[in-house]
Image: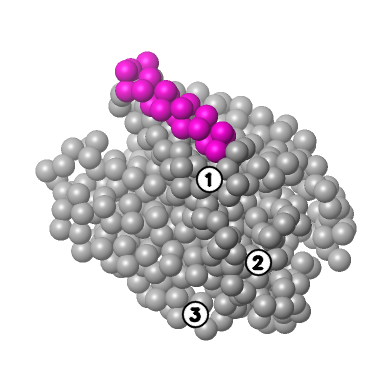
Amino acid sequence: MSQGSTAEEHPSTGPSTEVSLEAATRTTALLCVAAFMTMLDLFIVNVAFESIGETYSESSLGGLSWVLNAYVVVYAACLIPAGNLSDRYGRKQGFLVGLGLFTIASLGCAVAPTLGFLIAFRVAQAAGAAVLTPASLGLILSVLPQARRAGAVKVWATSSSFAGALGPVIGGLLAETSWRWAFLLNLPIGLLAFVVAVRMLPKGAPASRRQVPDPVGAIAMAVAIGVLSLGLVKADDWGWGSARMLVTAVITVVAVTLLIHRVRTHPAPTMSPRLFRVPSFTVANITILIFTGAFSAVFLSVSLWLETAADYGPLLAGLALVPGPLAVPPFAALTQRWAARVPARFVVSVGLAIFGLGSLLLATQGGVHYATDILPGWIIIGVGIGIAMPTLIGTATADLAPADAATGSAVVNTARQAGYALGVAGLVAILGSQATLHTGGTFRDGWIFVTALVLISAVTALRIRQQRSRHAEDQ
């Protein structure tokens, strides 16, 4: 353990204090509910997008796109600095601040009188989610005993699949009445979770405040991730070879260079270089980046297929999306039964290979019939994700010191967001603005792109080497 880690956020008796099974279950459930809420909102807004456009009919499509893009950009840019601050100044405090900000911003989104106000509150939502997410995973890693951490992390990771299953359905249903209910839904959940968290989560020992995390490095990181994400989500509008994209690339390179310099030289870097000396952490994050790119591309492509080639409405499209995400939780649970003695890299690689089989099956179908052309491959993709994702997320943080838990989880979630932007940008670049989307055949190249990404991630997963054996972790 690194120097100074004992001053980090832990219960006063240390993170290995015996916690009853009931208390561990309650804590994990609370943290999963909060993380679920932030993911649910993302899926709901995707389906309710058309309804939002009808409310602000005077706005352009480019302006409306920022209801989605602003959230992705700000969330990705703030994750790592927020995780670092939670590590240093208290994970419970970070969790409560993030949850409170997200809940209040949700109310602002629901009552936004103009598109500008809606986008501003979406930015505030993203900032709250960026604080909440790494703090919640960091609390699991620091509050629960060692023997219960791996299982709790996998449950935490799997909870997002429930959001993927429920989000499109809820979004489609609410879009039939008013999209504002998509944000109002967060109020009772957020308020209840806040009250329970205040009473249930341990306050923890005072955190070390000997040095403030490097502000220049934090700004450089936010600029690098924010500008890169902005470039990716706007690449189709601006053009990949445009002057704006060139400026975006230059700013990103300069910011990354400055960040690397500050991380290597500053006494209190915003992101500790020791994180990347952990082999499993580095390789797992590369795998997560590529895998998430494949996931975001296939989710968007199937959604577009349902709304164009199959001509489904919002609610019917949402229902049609359910089987894939719904396959994730049971296979995630089943995997843990037979994979306990199998190296994590093999479990992840097998799951990703199954994902690739599903996307390849999509690519081989040329019809416009959901039951025969989409559903089989979509379910297989869900099975593969269920096998791979929980173990992959758990492996990424398994070898980190407790002092780096929230910062490390923030890096993991930043990799996921960057992968999301990459996958969407790549798919849009492949599909372009073709007028033939309604034929369904133009999606084949997109699904081949997804297959290539996920098979690459299956190969990188084989290079994950954990410092502690699975057997040791289970003891």
On the picture, is 455 further left or further right than 33? right
Q: Which residue is mark 2?
A: 7
Q: CA separation, marks 1 and 3?
A: 27 Å
Q: Quadrant of the N terminus?
A: bottom right
Identity of the residue drawn at 30% across and 27% down: 237
Amino acid type at image mark 3:
Val
Amino acid type at image mark 1:
Thr
- Quick one: SS at disc 2? helix
- Asked if residue 445 shows in the view, the reply is yes
Mark 1 or mark 2: which comes first in sequence?
Answer: 2
Give the prevailing secondary structure in the magenta stretch.
helix
Identify the disc placed on residue 133. none
- Quick one: SS at disc 1? helix
Question: Residue 2 lies in magenta, yes or no?
Answer: no
Identity of the residue drawn at 32% across and 18% down: 243
Q: Quadrant of the C terminus?
A: bottom right
Q: Which residue is mark 3?
A: 198
Magenta residues, as a range? 241-262
Identity of the residue drawn at 65% across and 51% down: 393
Work out whether residue 69 or residue 94 is closer to the camera in this orientation and state it. 94
Quadrant assignment, res 359? top right
